[in-house]
Amino acid sequence: MNGYDALQTHIAQLSDLLNAISVLKWDARTNMPPGGAQTRGFQLATLSRVAQEHFVSDRTARLLDAAETEVAAEPADSYRVRAVKQTRQYYEIVRRIPVELTARKATLAPVSEQVWAEAKQKNDFASFAPYLQQMLDLVRQQAEAIGYSGHPFDALVFEYEPSVTAASLKVLFGELKAGLIPLLQRIVANDCPLERDLWQHEYPLDKQKAFGLEMAQRIGYDLERGRLDIAPHPFEISFTRQDVRITTRYNLNYLPMALYGTLHEAGHALYEQGVDPALTRTALTTDFLGQYPVGGTSYGAHESQSRLWENQIGRSRAFWEAHLDRLREIFPEQLAGVDPDLMYRSVNRVRPSLIRVEADEVTYNLHIMLRVEIEMALLEGNLKVSELPAFWNAKMQEYLGVTPPNDSKGVLQDVHWSGGGFGSFPGYTIGNIMSAQFLEAAYQQIPGLQDSLNAGDYAPLLGWLQHNVYRHGRAYDANELLVRSSGSPLRVAPYLAYLEGKFTELYHLP
Amino acid sequence: MNGYDALQTHIAQLSDLLNAISVLKWDARTNMPPGGAQTRGFQLATLSRVAQEHFVSDRTARLLDAAETEVAAEPADSYRVRAVKQTRQYYEIVRRIPVELTARKATLAPVSEQVWAEAKQKNDFASFAPYLQQMLDLVRQQAEAIGYSGHPFDALVFEYEPSVTAASLKVLFGELKAGLIPLLQRIVANDCPLERDLWQHEYPLDKQKAFGLEMAQRIGYDLERGRLDIAPHPFEISFTRQDVRITTRYNLNYLPMALYGTLHEAGHALYEQGVDPALTRTALTTDFLGQYPVGGTSYGAHESQSRLWENQIGRSRAFWEAHLDRLREIFPEQLAGVDPDLMYRSVNRVRPSLIRVEADEVTYNLHIMLRVEIEMALLEGNLKVSELPAFWNAKMQEYLGVTPPNDSKGVLQDVHWSGGGFGSFPGYTIGNIMSAQFLEAAYQQIPGLQDSLNAGDYAPLLGWLQHNVYRHGRAYDANELLVRSSGSPLRVAPYLAYLEGKFTELYHLP
């Protein structure tokens, strides 16, 4: 076997190990009985250790050298060259992380996640604090091991969004805030109650599930290679493009929760299911550092797809023009007399609120900025874990003008920190921005796109995204994907223009 | 770290890897979408390869040498000595199996199982035959690699039931047949239809599930460390005693299918959940060769517990005296006017039939003998895969006097061969025999046991089994467990006496 193929076989085994880790994590979050958390932690620790040892071995070094020689003269943007280049890049980083540290994080995570889930349910931050402290300590050690020139956050955000740093995020967030806050103020000033509250009825869960799955399939989610389950904190996870699973959660009254959760995660899943089959088990679908190995190129690129399908498609007027009749067939009594316009306005109410995953499109990014600021302060040592609840509440007041009545609806709402996912939040906002840039390009390049969307036909858009984004896996980074498809790197303007246009029309803003 | 502890840490990691394999297998059989089979095979192959390389490494050899020296003077039946001894025994065997062979079996199994499931559904043996042939070839290679003095079957059955051989099974089966066949003939001669067929009603599945789970918990199954799912071919699987899962399948009319499936698998689960916590992640809960690592000492010992709780408890007159009222609360219309005696007779009808897992206690072992004979013939090369359906049907006629109308109800009914589980069937019959021997001893040693069972109180029996069987994990082999608890090695007499007593009374035999 030659250099490149031998490296590929070696990386395929790493991919198998990381996918097995993902199966164990999916199971821990959907099915595992409570008693299993500790031994699951041991299993994850051993698998993480084995995976890391496999990757940082001398064998990898030898195979990399040979593969680099072999592809040296090939085009710089070919998949083969990219695969070798990324393997090298991550090899140099992962080598710096002590295997013991990886194993300790992996052991702690499922226990910590379970303690978090219980703490959230019981509104008991104090019981979770020691676990968060331990996780924070490990994450700090990881940042030191990886190294950084500016801020420790840089070492962590690299795992999720390699193209940004603490410094660049401050600029980006500033630009975004300058557009969002005036828009929010205009909306709030023009807000008035809807003529009817659709979410006072009951929507039986099995029917909610059926409609959500129908819509997910409609946008292109393939159930031959996927399934939908329940999780308190919804997520998508992939064990190769052949098995890409989504989860959602249900509220008997508030139908949008499960529906948009499903569309959001289905958007992630479209990305994973759409990767070129030739990239399966290669470096270009392997997240060498990832807690949840993703086939997509970064968390931001991934989130651009979940947010695009959830919001720009699922919360569009065209979506409800196309699909309200079907929903009314399923819930004829609850939705009697409801027209697409009322449904459109009902799923797009802008209101400063407490919960990130329930936030509207305008306020959503403020939730992210708050979290990123907190992470930076924790990493700097300027904020103690014990001070978190009060700090959180003060920031919520500052950014959104609301104060959580308890920690369950405040600092305890997200799973991320319990699992050690520091540095992952910026991906959400970068994803929002990317989604508008992609969609702007798609509208320019696909003839009659709006007509297709009006007809509930998502094949042209899916095809464009698959061609420009999904199929490449991790071959090109977020900015390369943007440049290749839209002609320019990340720009905030299309996103602000999208929000401005949508909500000016929706709220009849002056 | 000293010799024993260092070995233990090393084996704990092997245990983690094997448990991870089990999670992936559980998932493949309960949740995995069809498209995932092939890449799941790759994942299992890599994990199996990594696990085997971990175990047959020079490091294991060094650690074993040191541990053997350290425990040399300790009591021969102590857990420590047993752990080291078993590690050595399996180390010498597993070394002989090429890692490539393990990986090929692991890659093939999930695909082959899926093809089998589809073939069974479509009654299409021909589509499954090539996969069975491949698996048979791999299994033969494994037998040759392990080695044997008598029959290739000996090398395979060792994985499941180390104490038996092809030759010893022939003697055992002969003794059993000599008791079973006359009993069956007497029953058939005295058979007459029941006054009422309880299985013509419909029993909604959610209520069946609720009752099954209630009874499983009643006998001691701990849902904090377990869960119940659906699988077309029910099984129990353990990822340490902290996470022991069961599955069953449902028939809307035939309530006993799910109930006894649940009790059967819960019996397995009691064993796994009852292992001494100190043995978690040690050699004494590690099935070094196992396709489904079990904490119990052999498939027969394990099956003794599933069959004991399913049949000797669940299908007893006392069980229905204690629990029929509860079942009638759940199904008041379907079971109106039914008394414990009718229920008892309804779940104990003896009839030669087609499906092993639905067979009554008297005919069950004939299904096993047929399978074992077929496996031996396949391994000897005296039977070709293409000849299997006809051979199966002829044997069914010979042993049970019935002929399957199609292969779905014949040779395709069991999952075992598709996954490579040759050698596993004798465990069922040995389990039946052991169960009666254990129960005979329990009746002798537990004062008032029958009274407890009449009252639906299973704690005394569970406590006895836990003390004499479960807690020891794999520390003592099947015969040692029998000798320690009942005073003698495996004896057929208690089992034949149990069947003779039960069915003489039930059928008013002369």
Image (tube, coloured by chain):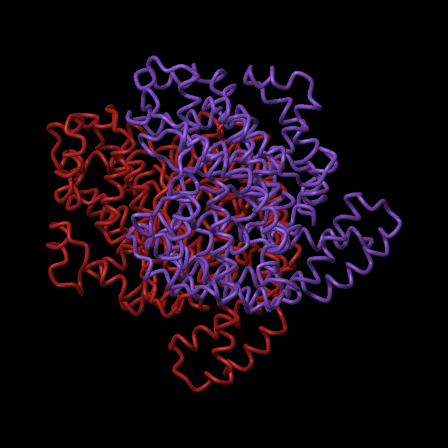
Chain colours: A red, B purple
Farthest bottom residue in view: A73
Q: Quadrant of residue B471?
A: top right
In this image, B164 relative to B178: left or right?
A: right
Farthest front residue in view: B510
| Residue A427, position as x, y percentages in the image | 41, 53
| Residue B104, position as x, y percentages in the image | 50, 66
Farthest top residue in view: B337
In this image, B436 relative to B405: left or right?
A: right
Which of these two is toward me, A131 or B165?
B165
Q: How many marks?
A: 0
Q: Is residue A396 above or below residue A497?
A: above
What residue is at 49 percent from the left and 29 percent from the top? Answer: A407
Q: Is residue A282 above or below residue A332?
A: below
What residue is at 21 percent from the left and 61 percent from the top? Answer: A442
Q: Is residue A387 visible?
A: no
Q: Quadrant of residue A251?
A: top left
In this image, B386 relative to B136: left or right?
A: left
Q: Is residue B24 visible?
A: yes
Which of these two is toward me, B406 or B252?
B406
| Residue A333, position as x, y percentages in the image | 15, 25
Which of these two is toward me, A343 or B450?
B450
Q: Is residue B460 above or below residue B165?
A: above
